Every structure is written in structure tokens, then in C-alpha cells.
Image (cartoon, rainbow, N blue to C red):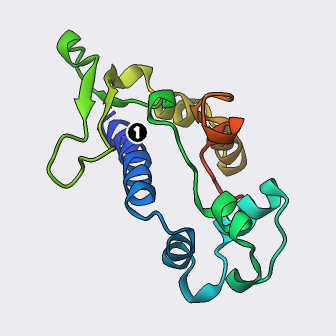
């Protein structure tokens, strides 16, 4: 169970880190260069480009608008449904405010909470998967922010490359 708890919490931390970096880097071109080393697209970038209907061979081929669409998730903090989990049910931690540290402040604070590990989506997906393809498909369908509440009215899902 501890592995599934850690996996869930790493995904929650990834959401927060992505929002922190997007907030800290207002320049879309610099963000694109930081996420796309040597101007070449990673497999995850190509999958997202396909999903968004963007076609380009290298970073320099993208318009400023396409860079923004491709490299920014623009997650609305209040819309996030993915919470951290722990092995015990502690009522006082069901709602918690995060992002209050000195380096995280200035727009990165938000209210979140904890669920119990046995109720986590990670546990459900890993417990019910029958192989890599079903696991990847289930992750791809898993939403971290609902449709209509995230910027540009697009659902925010986990980008999971098929193998």
C-alpha cells in the first residue's frame, strides 16, 4: 500500500510543481525552451501535439500561440480534484492550505486536502489493470481537473505515452 500512496503523492507534487514553474516563468518562449531541450520534441510532446492538432518538426516551427497551447497547462488551482493521500483517516487534514512557504508564495497558495490511500485513483487503476495498455488507457482518462473549470475549457488529464 505504501508504494501506491507514494505514487499518488508524487503525482500530486508533479501538479503543484508544474503550476509553480508555469507561474514563475511568464515568458512562453523560455518555458518552451526549458521543456524542449535542444529544440527537439520528446514523445510526450508529440502525443500532446497530436491531441491539440499542432504540426511541427522542431521547436522553431511553432508559432507563439502554439507554444503556449503546447507547453502551458494553465491549470486553475481551484479546479484540481487530485489530492494527496495517506494511510490513516485524519479528519483535520481533509482540508489543508499549501504553498505557504517563502519560495512558493505569490500566487501558488491553494486549498487542497488528503484522502485515505484505499480511496485513491492510483490504487484503483493499479488494482484493476490487466496490462500496460489498459493501465496507460486508464491513466490517460484520469482527470486532475474537470472539463469547463480549467483554462480554455479543456479537461486536464495525465499525458501518458503508449508503448
Give coordinates of residue 108: x percent, y percent. 32, 44
Quadrant (top left, top right, bottom left, bottom right) of the C terminus: bottom right
Q: Residue furthest bottom?
A: 38
Q: Secondary structure at mark 1?
A: helix
Q: Residue at x 53, y 42 (%)?
A: 75
Give coordinates of residue 45: x percent, y percent. 67, 67
Drawn side of residue 33 relative to residue 96, left or right: right
Give coordinates of residue 150: x percent, y percent. 60, 35
Q: Look at the picture and state if 116 lies above or below 27.
A: above
Which image quadrant for residue 18? bottom left
| Count of marks placed on residues | 1
Q: Look at the picture and state if 144 lies above or below 51.
A: above
Front in this rendered view, residue 160 or 157: 157
Q: Look at the picture and state if 79 lies above or below 57.
A: above
Q: Residues within 10 Å of mark 1 (few under 14, many from 20)?
A: many
Q: Residue at x 28, y 16 (%)?
A: 94
Query: Which residue, given by chain and number where applicable, does mark 1 sit on?
Result: 8
Q: Look at the picture and state if 141 lies above or below 94.
A: below
Q: Residue furthest left?
A: 102
Q: Residue at x 71, y 43 (%)?
A: 137
Q: Residue at x 27, y 47 (%)?
A: 106
Which image quadrant for residue 84? top left
Give coordinates of residue 83: x percent, y percent. 39, 29
Quadrant (top left, top right, bottom left, bottom right) of the N terminus: top left
Drawn side of residue 10 relative to residue 92, left or right: right
Amino acid at each position: 500500500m505504501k508504494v501506491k500512496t507514494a505514487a499518488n503523492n508524487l503525482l500530486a507534487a508533479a501538479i503543484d510543481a508544474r503550476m509553480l514553474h508555469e507561474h514563475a516563468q511568464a515568458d512562453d518562449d523560455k518555458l518552451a525552451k526549458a521543456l524542449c531541450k535542444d529544440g527537439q520534441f520528446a514523445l510526450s510532446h508529440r502525443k500532446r501535439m497530436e491531441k491539440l492538432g499542432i504540426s511541427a518538426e522542431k521547436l522553431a516551427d511553432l508559432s507563439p500561440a502554439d507554444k503556449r497551447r503546447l507547453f502551458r497547462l494553465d491549470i486553475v488551482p481551484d479546479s484540481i480534484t487530485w489530492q494527496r493521500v495517506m494511510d490513516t483517516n485524519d479528519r483535520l487534514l481533509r482540508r489543508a492550505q499549501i504553498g505557504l512557504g517563502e519560495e512558493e508564495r505569490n500566487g501558488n497558495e491553494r486549498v487542497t486536502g488528503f484522502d485515505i490511500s484505499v480511496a485513491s485513483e492510483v490504487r484503483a487503476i493499479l488494482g484493476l489493470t490487466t496490462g500496460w495498455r489498459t493501465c496507460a488507457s486508464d491513466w490517460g482518462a484520469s482527470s486532475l481537473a474537470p472539463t469547463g473549470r480549467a483554462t480554455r475549457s479543456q479537461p486536464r488529464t495525465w499525458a501518458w505515452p503508449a508503448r
